[in-house]
Amino acid sequence: MSTALTPENREKLRKISVATITTALFKRNFRNQFIQDVRPVGTKAPQMVGEAYTLRYIPAREDLDHIGVFEDRTHPQRRTIEDCPPGYVLVIDSRKDARAASAGGILITRLMMRGAAGIVSDGGFRDCPEIAEMAFPVYQNRPAPPTNLTRQRAIDINVPIGCGDAPVFPGDIIVGDGEGVVVIPAHLANEIAEEGHEMTAYEDFVMEKVREGRGIFGLYPGGPEAKAEFALWRKANGR
C-alpha cells in the first residue's frame, strides 16, 4: 500500500496549523517532530507543505574549504539547489550554527524559481531583508553574517539529518506556518492530514462559541452536547 501523500491531503495540510499537527503526532508518542528555534524570515509566504530533501553540513576544514570551492559544479550546496525536486522542501542541518550562511538570496531565489516548496535551516541565511519580501517560505534560526562563508562544509545530500533537534528523513512531509515547522513521518502523513482536518473543524467551532461568550467546560474538550451541536454547526457551515 502506497504511503505517498495524496493531493487531497496535501491541500488539507495547507489549512492545518503546526500546533494541531504536533498535537496529532503527540497522541502517537512522537515528541520530537517540531524543529526547535526556527522561524519564518518574512510574513508574505503561504503555508509550507512538501516532501523533505536534505543537506547536511559539518565544520569546515581550512585546507579544503575556501571561497574557490563554490566554482565547482559538484559542490553539494550548489548541486542541492539545482537537484531539489519541484514541490519539495530543502531542509538543512547547519548544526544550529548561524555564524555562516546556509544559503543566500540568489540561491534561495533559484530554488523558488525551480518550483521548490520552501527551505528550512537550523542555522541562518544571508540577504534576509530581500528574502523577507519573497512570497516563498523560508525558515531559519537567525540571520547569518555576510562573512564566514567557509565556516561550514556541505557534505551530504538527501540523507537522514537532524534539524533543530528534529529527525528528518528524505521524503518526510514538512509543514511550516507562522509559528514554526513540523516534520511528519512519511508513513503517517495521510492519517495526520485527515485527523488534523477534523481537529481544525472542531477547533474553529470552539473558537466561534468562545467568542460568543461560551465557557470552555464541556466544550473544550467536547462533551456529548457540544459534539451534537458541532455536528449541526458543521452541516450548516459545510465543514
Image (cartoon, helix red, strand yellow):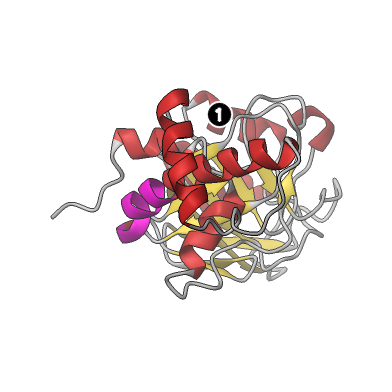
Can you give x and y, in whole percent of width and height, for residue 176 in the image?
59, 45
Residue 86 shows in the view: no
Q: Which residue is mark 1?
A: 112
Quadrant showing the C terminus: top left
Give the camera-side residue of 40 and 125. Answer: 40
Q: Residue at x 81, y 52 (%)?
A: 142
Q: Specify start and end residues of the magenta stretch as a single range.
A: 187-195
Depth order, front residue of 13/54: 13
Q: Position of residue 220 (x, y in %)?
A: 60, 56
Q: Residue 125: horizontal and vertical position, in percent?
A: 74, 46
Instruction: Look at the image and tell me whether residue 216 can be seen.
Output: yes
Q: Amino acid at mark 1?
A: Met
87 in magenta? no
Q: How many other residues sit within 10 Å of disc 1, few (<14), some (14-19) or many (≥20)?
A: many
Chief SS of the magenta region: helix
Instruction: Identify the image quadrant of residue 33.
Output: bottom right
Q: Residue at x 28, y 39 (%)?
A: 6
